[in-house]
Image (cartoon, rainbow, N blue to C red):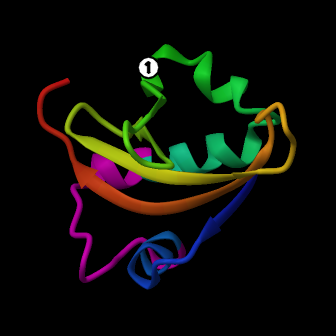
Amino acid sequence: MKLIILDKSLLELYESGKSRKYRLPENVLRKFFMRLQQIEAAKTIYDLWKTPSLRFEHLEGTHSYSMRITEKWRLEIRIEWDDEEKTTGTVTVTNISNHYGD
């Protein structure tokens, strides 16, 4: 699947490993890069859904999805679908959020 990062702070984090806005622990950064690689490697959305540890889910009331980075951190994304079956598309990373509970 195609990957886009529009947020300047997230793009800076992706390109350099550092960002003023996102001061993340080393283990979270490592997993962040791993998640982005998983998205790029996925051929269809099912490649992400079938991995239970990602906890890939649709966020109710929005057009966004989230996937686990670590127990406390989530990657929030939007998907612009390329087909009517909603299996392939362009993934836009929108945010990294601190997630409590899980």
* Element type where label 1 sits in the image: helix
Magenta range? 15-31
Residue 20 spot, x, y in % from top left = 25, 83
Q: Position of residue 9 (x, y in %)?
A: 39, 80
Task: Give the residue at x 71% y 23%.
Answer: 46
Judge from the rendering whether residue 87 lies leftward or rightward of residue 45; answer left or right.
Answer: right
The quarter of the picture where residue 12 lies is bottom left
Task: Look at the picture and state if 5 lies above or below 2.
Answer: below
Q: Position of residue 58 (x, y in %)?
A: 47, 34
Residue at image location 45% in from the left, 63% down from the top: 94
Q: Which residue is mark 1?
A: 53
Q: Is residue 6 left or right of residue 28?
A: right
Residue 93 at least partly seen: yes
- Toward the left, the furthest residue is 100
Q: Would residue 84 be found to the left or right of residue 28 on screen?
A: right
Taking depth in this image into account, of 37 and 89 the one nearest to the observer is: 89
* Quadrant assignment for the C terminus: top left
Viewer-proximal residue, 60 or 102? Answer: 60
From the top left corner, tell me how far across and down residue 17 is, in percent.
42, 71
Residue 3 among those drawn in magenta: no
Pick the front one: 27 or 63: 63
